[in-house]
Each structure stands twice: as structure tokens, then as C-alpha cells.
Image (cartoon, rainbow, N blue to C red):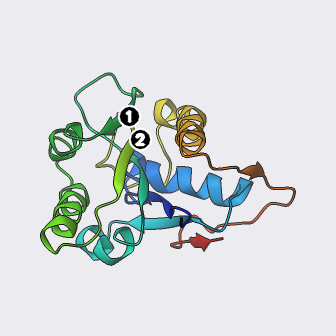
Amino acid sequence: MTTPRIMILGIGNLLFSDEGFGVRVLQRLMEGYEFPENVSLVDGGVLGLNLLGVISEADHLIVVDAVRNHGKPGTCYRLEGKAIPERIRAKNSLHQVDFLEALTLCQALDTQVPETVILGVEPVDIETASIELTPIVAEQIEPILQMVFAELRRLNVAFSKRTKDVPCDPLKNCEYRT
């Protein structure tokens, strides 16, 4: 029996305020936590369809992103199964639609489709050019981290806090694979 490959994928655009939420959460994971060899952390940025090869490597995919669901700003979401396409299409962001198409193409190309869960927050602003998250969304980083940890525990993955910080430049794409 092989160890399942688990990928935590942060997606979004750091240059448009809350749009960068998924990447900000990923940076916190990279900087503050250690994971076993079968867990990879990937900054997917706005790569959309270009993530096809990356996501097909995973058995389990945990995606972190801003998710526009027309709810109260700062609301946290956990989406899986049939709920994913409806919510992603509602975001009106090209990288989100492309990401959904990448998942669909995995199936069409007879490539492995990972068990996917999307963890996200309702954004306040995904259009203003700013490298800062809005305060309401920034407050949701810790709750979403806890949701990521719950998913990892569900998958029987042990992880720990780092004893030494690993810096990740917020203006560069970071990829950290343990």
C-alpha cells in the first residue's frame, strides 16, 4: 500500500487585495509548519489550466482561495464534490474557472482526479490593486489554517510547528515541497 500524495494548493493573485488570500494562507503554512514527505505545498498563483500537471500528481488536493459566494464578507467555506463547480463559477475570476477546467480535464484525459476540498473565505475586495488583505479577510487566516489542519487530520497526516521560521517573499511565487 502506497502513502497517499497530499497537496495543499494556494491560489489567487497577490496584487488584488483579498484575491491573494489563498497564497497568503499557503505562505503561513510554509513559514510556520513542517509536513511529512508525502505532503506538498504549492503556490498556484493564477496559473489555472497550467496547474493540470501539478494537481494530477495528488491523491488528495486541499485548495485554499477566496471564494465569492455572495455571502457575508469573511464567511469561511468548505466545498467538496458537486458544490465546487457552482461556487467557483460564481467567483467570476479567470483563474478560478481555469482551475475548475483543469480538474475537469484530469477526468477527460483519464488522468487521476484527486479528491478535492476547497477551503475559502468570502472576499470583501478582489478588484483593488493592493498587496494587503482587507482586515475582515485577514482575520480569517487563522480559522482557515485550522480548517486545513482538520483536513490533514482527517487524512491521518501528522504535522508540527516549525522550530525555525522559513521566510517566503510575499511578492515571489513560493513552492515548498517537503
The residue that appears at 31% across and 46% down in the rendered structure is 126
Query: Vertical placement of 38 versus 60: above or below?
Result: below
Query: Which element is circle 1 on?
Result: strand
Question: What is the x, y in percent for residue 43?
Answer: 48, 66
Question: What is the x, y in percent for residue 72?
Answer: 33, 22
Residue carrying label 2:
119
Q: Tell me, yes or no, if residue 124 can be seen here.
A: no
- Mark 2 touches mark 1? (CB < 8 Å): yes
The residue that appears at 57% across and 36% down in the rendered structure is 150
Nearer to us in this view, 77 or 38: 38
Query: Vertical placement of 81 versus 94: above or below?
Result: above
* Distance from Cα at disc 2 to Cα at disc 1: 5 Å
Of mark 2 and mark 1, the one earlier in the sequence is: 1
Q: Residues within 10 Å of mark 2 (few under 14, many from 20)?
A: many
The residue that appears at 19% across and 39% down in the rendered structure is 82
Q: Amino acid at mark 1?
A: Arg
Question: What is the x, y in percent for residue 96?
Answer: 24, 55
Quarter holding the C terminus is bottom right
Residue at the farthest right position: 163
Residue carrying label 1:
78
Q: Residue 108: which disc?
A: none
Query: Vertical placement of 5 versus 152: above or below?
Result: below
> Is residue 61 rendered to the left or right of residue 82?
right
Query: Which element is circle 2 on?
Result: strand
The residue that appears at 48% across and 61% down in the rendered structure is 7
Question: What is the x, y in percent for residue 90?
Answer: 16, 40
> Is residue 85 rendered to the left or right of residue 115?
left
Q: Amino acid at mark 2?
A: Leu
Nearer to us in this view, 113 or 177: 113
Q: Tell me, yes or no, if residue 88 can be seen here.
A: yes
